[in-house]
Image (cartoon, grey):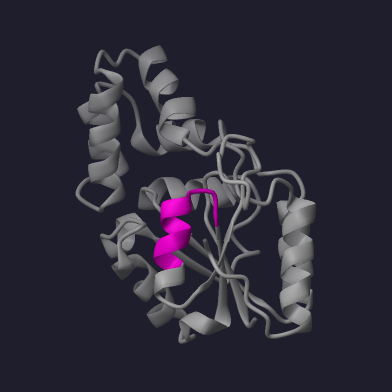
Amino acid sequence: MRAVAFDAMGVLYRSGDDVRDILVPFARARGSTLSDDDIRVAYRRASLGEATSAELWTQLGVAGDAAELDATYVRGLEVTPGVAALIDELRAQGVVVGCISNDIVEWSLAARRAHGIDARVDYWTISGAVRSRKPQREIYLAFLEQTGLAAGDVVFVDDRAVNVEAAAALGFDAILVDFGGTASSGDALRTVAALRSALGARRQGPQRVPVK
């Protein structure tokens, strides 16, 4: 294990569905009249690099300075308790730390700076920058190209089974987590402590745990 690549929403941050949990109520409180589905569609386009955050706010009918809206919006996120300490431990052990996230470029940058994790993570591969979203293979390959690592060198951690399966198909050692207690899979690790133990086991030997 040379590197660990974390998902953002549901792993680094507590919310596993930031559109439902944060964006929809945020936009509605500021005058948006779009349906939940229309908000999600507009967000998805922006997370593929087809619109900036400023253009998205306009599409949602939210008025104001885009940078200020971005900064206020990302304050609604919360770093998963224990994750920052885990990242620090990995880095102290010489493990490269990355993030592969479906997100808007401006929001990803604002969030990680606001919550003190930007400098903790060596490589950020964001869907809005590479124009590919998990579980599409291109975003995983973009991470490997960015880092110069082989898939077999990387443990990938995500809270969505479809993303874990896609990574495993490319040769990543993939781990499914469920810190929010919403997944139906019994294979998911439910706590940061359980993830720490799983990563520690991989540091001690070459064994791989297959994705079912």
In the image: residue 47, left or right of residue 115: left
Q: Can residue 163 be found in the magenta stretch? A: yes
- Magenta highlight: main SS: helix
Above or below, comparing residue 108 to residue 152 in the picture: above
- The residue depicted at 65 percent of the width and 64 percent of the height is 120
Image x and y of residue 19, in percent: 41, 32
Q: Quadrant of residue 68?
A: top left
Image x and y of residue 175, in percent: 59, 61
- The residue depicted at 29 percent of the width and 16 percent of the height is 32
Q: Can residue 116 be found in the magenta stretch? A: no
Image x and y of residue 73, in percent: 48, 32
Q: Quadrant of residue 56?
A: top left
Image x and y of residue 110, in percent: 49, 47
- Nearest the camera: 122 or 179? 179
Q: Quadrant of the N terminus?
A: bottom right
- Nearest the camera: 61 or 2? 2
Above or below, comparing residue 87 to residue 24 in the picture: below
- The residue depicted at 66 percent of the width and 42 percent of the height is 179
Above or below, comparing residue 195 to residue 180 in the picture: below
- The residue depicted at 24 percent of the width and 35 percent of the height is 42
What's the magenta region? 158-167
In the image: residue 137, left or right of residue 148: left
